[in-house]
Image (cartoon, rainbow, N blue to C red):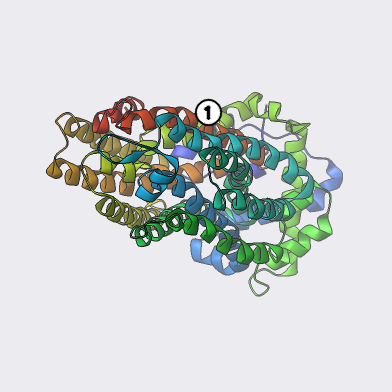
Amino acid sequence: MGTSKLSQHDTKQDAFVSEERDQTGGNETALPPNDSQGDNIIAAKLAAEREKDMGVWQAIRAYPKAVCFSMILSMSLIMESYDLTLTRNFFGLPQFRKRFGHPLDNGDYQLTSSWMSGLQNGTQVGQILGLMLAGILTERYGYKKTIIGCMLFLTCFIFLFFFATRIEMLFAASILCGLPWGAFQTLTTTYAADVTPLTLRPILTTFVNMCWTIGYLISGGVLRGLLGRKDDWAWRIPYAIQWVFLPPLITAVLFTPESPIWLVRKGRLDDARKSLRRLTSASTWPEEEIERKVALIDYENRMEKKLTEGVSYLDCFKGTNLKRTEITCCAWLAQIACGASFASNGTYFLQQVGLDPAQSFNFSLGTSGLALLGTLLAWFILTRVGRRRLYLCGLASLFLILLTIGFMGIPAPMPGVAWASGVLLMIFVAIYDLTIGPIGYCLVSEIPSSRLRIKTVILARNTYNIASICANFLNPPILNPTAWNLRGKGVSYGLAFAF
């Protein structure tokens, strides 16, 4: 099955993406257009050539508002990252463990490994359902209405977290909040790919990864500041802070223009022109260029519609789209398989290898800071180093770090080993957010065709969530002193997948 020559510019990036595109038949000839479309075809070609030749700063000057709106929507992931990190960090919070756990012989309190897995996997189940619903709702109602609706539902669901008195209530809240969280994960990435030119997509999709690291940093800082409290407000206040994010985000989304690609798919060409005017700079993007851009989107949409008639999830597994789906799913699957899920429980892990709660949360803050730095550096490296080379170097480095942590977990816990494990964990996260983390977001936005982008990204994210569920069943018993208590030796499964 062929693809449009005009749409080839949508995924031509560097050697990594080019190789995969060649394997998927990206150089085949498109179905010939109707002769009556001559003027629109010429306009589409001119728009494609201009966008392809844009430099980074030229693209920013042409699309300044698109950059801002894309970043605003991506900031919803700061809220989501903060929310998701709370659960894992609460496992290391003594006040939370005392409220929802059970006493041990040494006077400490611990949650059972089954409930630790359950709380994390409840969120994953909700996200899987939310991702599937997001694809259906966005196709019908658009990005804006779907995202605002999800935020309103999340505002209500947070009450269940805040007023929880039993761990079962936390489990129910995890599933319900997972529904809108799943939608945010995919819609922010696909919106950035829809409204920005080719040159800016690596930067803005990498910014999505940065939003996750900012959320980690805020979560760690809040919990470290509340560590001295001895009452239930030590965990209730972090839950309440989730409400702080929502009013400004909802207000910002209300003023965000709808995706012009979605509007063209719905036949609303005039609305697509209005949206493009709001996304571009009038001084560098005159009305003639707006018409050309709409013609390009319309042409690509019609060509892809002929090639992927029906636009169902089944189409993601047909012809060249099957290869695109495989690559996209693997790009996100690797984020779990490389051992990052183990590192995400770093606060709890460091306590099990010998650090006290205050020291473990200090390490968590430092780790989040390095993650943010790694993502910032990725902005510069991604434009100079190929995706494939950076991806492989990242996996090799993570493998060596996991191997070292595993060997250090063999002897009994000692202060020196605990500090060394903490430092290695910080390096692990920094390398991950320099390589595997941001590149994954680049690939999942670049590889799918524009018509199947939302559905392909949803399938990829659900692959990620299913892998997360498996990891969440393994990590708690590996670390929990009442279960397997393997400590650092438990990284062995991450070693196998990273290799």
**Looking at the rendering, which quadrant does residue 376 occupy?**
bottom left
Q: Is residue 385 visible?
A: no
Residue 319 in the image, given as x and y percentages of width and height = 65, 24
Q: Is residue 135 above or below residue 24?
A: below
Q: Which residue is drawn at 83% across and 47% down?
A: 37
Name, please, the residue furthest toward the bottom.
Answer: 283
Q: Residue at x 45, y 42 (%)?
A: 100
Name, please, the residue furthest toward the right.
Answer: 36
Please tell me which residue lies in front, 200 or 410: 410
On the image, numbered disc 1 is attached to which residue? 23
Q: What element carries label 1?
A: helix
Residue 56 in the image, given as x and y percentages of width and height = 50, 61
Q: Which residue is drawn at 49% across and 51% down?
A: 81
Q: Tag 1: residue type?
A: Gln
Q: Can residue 239 be seen in this view?
A: yes
- Dividing the image into 4 quarters, which one contains the N terminus? top right
Seen in the image, is 316 located left or right of residue 470?
Answer: right
Residue 162 in the image, given as x and y percentages of width and height = 55, 53
Residue 423 in the image, given as x and y percentages of width and height = 22, 48
Seen in the image, is 358 located left or right of residue 226?
Answer: left
**Looking at the rendering, which quadrant does residue 452 occupy?**
top right
Q: Residue at x 79, y 39 (%)?
A: 33
Please tell me which residue lies in front, 401 or 465: 465
Q: In this view, does 135 lie above or below 251?
A: above
Mark 1 crowd level (few <14, some 14–19, many ≥20, 10 Å Cα): few
- Dividing the image into 4 quarters, which one contains the C terminus? top left
Seen in the image, is 412 located left or right of residue 429?
Answer: left
Please tell me which residue lies in front, 271 or 488: 488
How many marks are shown on the rendered structure? 1
